[in-house]
Image (cartoon, rainbow, N blue to C red):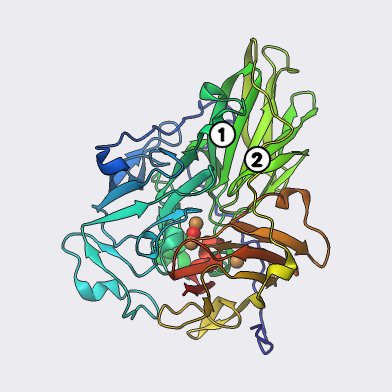
Amino acid sequence: GVSTSAALARRPSHTGAELRSAVPLPPPFQVPLPVPAVLKPVGTAGGADRYEITQREAAAEILPGVRTPLWTYEGTFPGPTIESRRGRPVIVTHRNELPVPTVVHLHGGRTRADSDGYPTDLVLPDGWVDGHAHGGHGMHDPRAVVTRRTRDYTFPLDQRPTMLWYHDHRMDFTAPAIWRGLAGLQIVRDDAEEALGLPAGRRELPLMIADRAFADDGSLVYPALDPALRRRPGVREPYLAGVLGDVILVNGAPWPVHEVDAARYRLRILNGSNARHYELEAVTDDGRPLALVQVGADQGLLAAPVTHRRLPMAPAERYDVVVDFSSVPVGGRVRLVNRLGSGRTRDVMAFRVARRVADDSRVPRVLSDDLPVWRRSDAVRVREFSFRAGRMHGGHGWLIGGLPFDPARSDVTVRLDDVEVWRLVADVHHPVHLHLVGFRVLSRGGRPPLPHDAGLKDTISLRPGESAEIITRFDGYRGRYLFHCHNAEHEDMGMMANLEVI
Ligand code: C2O
Ligand code: CU
């Protein structure tokens, strides 16, 4: 239920101050866009693909001439991309060689609870003293399944094709772990989608957008990892609101540039930032906007394309977008800009048109016919949840229904296959994410959903003061799941709740 008594003396602002980098930053559109390597399976036994990922420390040259220590999957940020087929299970053995416990969650995956990366299901590094696992508030979770060194995660991937992402999900420490590099992409495909004729091969680009800030030694600045910084006045507040950096990375490169054909490209965009919101626009050098033709949402293809001039993106949201560069002269440039940024955070990346080519790709008028349609009358229940700032453990935190996350508490119990309507009410910007299921947006502020709410979502961007309704069927698996704010700092500071499917 909604907390009615959350009297807040001092409500933190929703956008924290941006952390400033202390190293020289490169000019925009110089560094080539990297595309994360596709991970090779180590085996294909029993109709499943097996992978191994080592989580380890590594250094990368993110800014030219600057060495940045990272926490990585397989030594890179982003981690390697896993390419998978609908309905073909993937088993990933994660080996934790980092100095801290970790948890892996496949965001958007329809995964059994024991592989879903519950925040207390830790993988301890070798030599980690047990007691240290209880580093966070309320870590005493009798149901936690803790392993040492390795853990096998099984992903059935019996779901609509889309781009998922895997990232760390350790209780109270998710935000700094992602910030330091623990994020990668996983793409699910099927024959029906491939038959559509959307741009493919070189003309399909995954784009993980994330902001970061760099200290003078090249390391990533993160307030809570640096006690000296955290004690400085004015620094704890931005941490509470969410950590923002002054460098925009795409696939781990600062303001990169990518050479393209004068043709259609399919851009599979993830906002992998901890807290930064974007409003993306593609503009030519003479200021002409190119249409962003959305073909898919978080959970796969739309029924029909939706054309945007600007596309708002909250943390963890994915948009599958086709951009046609054929009207741009060879040598011309198209910048992807963030209308919400200012100064250097206004630029994201650029595309330089290199050659004219024949293009036989297309964007069909009908993209899919398998989107679930749930009517309000299908719902057996309407629940309401507030997402608000509040007091927790004697300090500021973020609460759902007036409570901070507690793994030992039961918050919401739903019956398998029930359809429910959830009404979500926000004080400031909160991107709300449900594990296990995709949902449709029914309404925003009592009005019909916005154009970018189309399709099947797993994360909804609640705007300040807004309430929205979503509808879903809790199908798939029974077990203990989660819903939470995907501003990663809000999530670490309490804004998460248990979702039990029985
Ligand atoms: Cu992207 Cu609970 O996660
Ligand atoms: Cu939030």
Q: Quadrant of residue 433?
A: bottom right
Q: Secondary structure at mark 2?
A: loop
x and y, in percent, of residue 357 in the image: 64, 10
x and y, in percent, of residue 340 in the image: 71, 48
Q: Which mark is residue 192?
A: 1
- Gap in angstroms between the C-alphas marked 1 and 2: 9 Å
Name which residue type carries label 1.
Ala
Residue at x 59%, y 64% (from the top left corner): 473
x and y, in percent, of residue 423 in the image: 69, 72
Residue 256 visible in image: no
Whether residue 280 sits left or right of residue 185 in the image: it is right
Q: Against 211, is 30 above or below?
A: above
Q: Which residue is mark 2?
A: 368
Circles 1 and 2: CB distance less than 8 Å? yes
Name which residue type carries label 2.
Ser
Residue 239 visible in image: yes
Q: Secondary structure at mark 1?
A: helix
Q: Nearer the viewer, residue 173 or 402?
A: 402
Residue at x 45%, y 57% (from the top left corner): 222
Q: Which mark is residue 109?
A: none
